[in-house]
Amino acid sequence: MKVERLVEIIGSDFYTGVPDSQLKALCNYLMDTYGIDPKHHIIAANEGNCTALAAGYHLATGKVPVVYMQNSGEGNIINPVASLLNDKVYAIPVVFIVGWRGEPGIHDEPQHIYQGEVTVKLLEDMGISCCIIGKDTSEEEVRAAMEGFREKLSQGLDVAFVIRKGALTDAPKVEYSNTNTMVREEIIQHIVKYSGEDPIISTTGKASRELFETRAANGQSHKYDFLTIGSMGHSSSIALGVAINKADSRIWCVDGDGAVLMHMGAMAVIGANRPGNLIHIVINNAAHETVGGMPTVAGNIDLVKIALACGYPNAVSVDSFEALDKELEAARNRNELSLIEVKCSIGAREDLGRPTSTALENKQSFMEYLSTL
C-alpha cells in the first residue's frame, strides 16, 4: 500500500524510531515531510530510547505516538514495554511499526533468521496486538485493523503493524549526503594495512562486508576478523572481551557512529577498564547508511571529548588519509587504549558483496586464530 495512506490511517503527528531498510518508504516519507523535527520526527539512538521518548510525548500531549524499527530492535523495547508502557503499570498507548526481516520462507541474511521466526510471537508475548501488512494487503483491511486498534489504544494497550518486504510503496526520493570526502572502504583498506595480522572485530553492516572484500582482494585469510553481522552497538564490547583475555595481542575494533550511539555506555566500560591493547576506530558518516542513509546525531556531537571523558587516554578525530595513517601508526606503536574517529562520506560500491562464509565458519576460524596468539 502507499506509505502516505498508512500514515493517514494511523493519524499520529509524532514518529520516533531507528531506520530500517524494510521501512525505507516510511523513513523517506517522514524525512520528506518533517525532516528531523523534535515536534514530529526524531531518530533516536536505539529502540528502547524511542519507546521512552514516545512515552514522554504521550504524557505531555495525551496523544498516541508511533515508534518504527526493524524487528531486531524488539529486544531493546522489551523492558520499557513491560515495565513502563504496560497497562499493569502506566498504560501508555503506542503504535509500533516493525519491519519484518527474516520472515519465514523469505531469504535473508543469517542474523535475521531467528529474529524473523519469533517476531510476531515476541510482540504477542508482550501483549501487543498485531496487523501484518504485505504487498496484497488492501487499504480497507488496514483501516479496519486500525479501527480495532483504537479501542485497545484507548485502554492504554499497545499495537503493532508488522511490515513485510515490499509492502509499503510510493515513497518520495530522498538523497542523503555529507561534506566528508573519505570513502569507508578505502578507510578499511588503510586499517587492514596497519593492523597486519592483528585480530579485528568489525561492526554490523557495510563495514564488515567491506572488510571481508578487502581481505579477499588482498589474498588474505579471513581468520583475522570477527564480523559482527548482527547485534548492532555491541562490537566494541566484544572487542573489549577479547582484548582483556588476549592481553599480549593488539586488538582492533572497527565501529560505526550509529552503532556507537546505540549503546554508548560501552565506551564508559571500555574507558574504565583501559585495555592497553585495544584500538577503537569509529567510522563516522553521521548516517544509518546500511539501511538507507537516514541521519544519526553523530554529526552534532564530539566523540573525542566523549571518549576522553569516559577514560580513554588517547582520542583523536581525522578527516584525511594522511592524518589517518599517522594516527594508525601512533596507535599501533603505543601500549594504551586509543580511539580514532574517522570522518567519512556516505556511499558504497553498487556491487559490494557479502561474506561467502557462514557466521559459524567465521566464528570458528577466528577462535582458532585467537588460540594461536
Image (cartoon, rainbow, N blue to C red):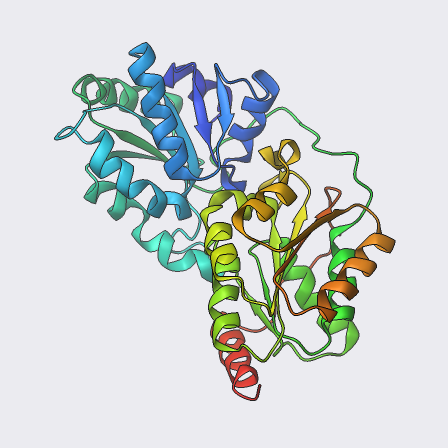
Q: Nearer the viewer, residue 85 or 133?
A: 85
Q: Residue furthest bottom?
A: 372
Residue shown at 59% from the left, 20% from the top: 35
Q: Nearer the viewer, residue 337 or 13?
A: 337
Is 219 left, or right, of 303 in this rendering?
right
Indicate the position of residue 273 as horizontal and vertical percent values. Answer: 48, 61
In the image, residue 41 sits, relative to residue 329, either above or below, namely above
In the image, residue 62 sits, relative to residue 260, either above or below, namely above
Q: Nearer the viewer, residue 372 or 189?
A: 372
Quarter of the image for the C terminus: give it.
Answer: bottom right
Q: Nearer the viewer, residue 97 or 136?
A: 97
Residue shown at 58% from the left, 42% from the top: 306
Residue shown at 25% from the left, 47% from the top: 121
Indicate the position of residue 355 as horizontal and vertical percent values. Answer: 61, 67
Indicate the position of residue 97 as horizontal and vertical percent values. Answer: 39, 32
Choose top left, top right, bottom left or bottom right for residue 351: bottom right
In the image, residue 350 sits, relative to residue 359, either above or below, namely above
Choose top left, top right, bottom left or bottom right for residue 255: bottom right
Is 126 left, or right, of 371 in this rendering?
left
Q: Residue furthest top?
A: 61
- Residue 315: in sight, yes or no? yes
In the image, residue 196 sits, relative to residue 211, either above or below, namely below
Residue shown at 56% from the left, 23% from the top: 29
Q: How many marks?
A: 0
Choose top left, top right, bottom left or bottom right for residue 217: bottom right
Q: Residue furthest right?
A: 322
- Residue 341: in sight, yes or no? no
Is 179 left, or right, of 136 in this rendering?
right
Indicate the position of residue 322 as horizontal and vertical percent values. Answer: 87, 55
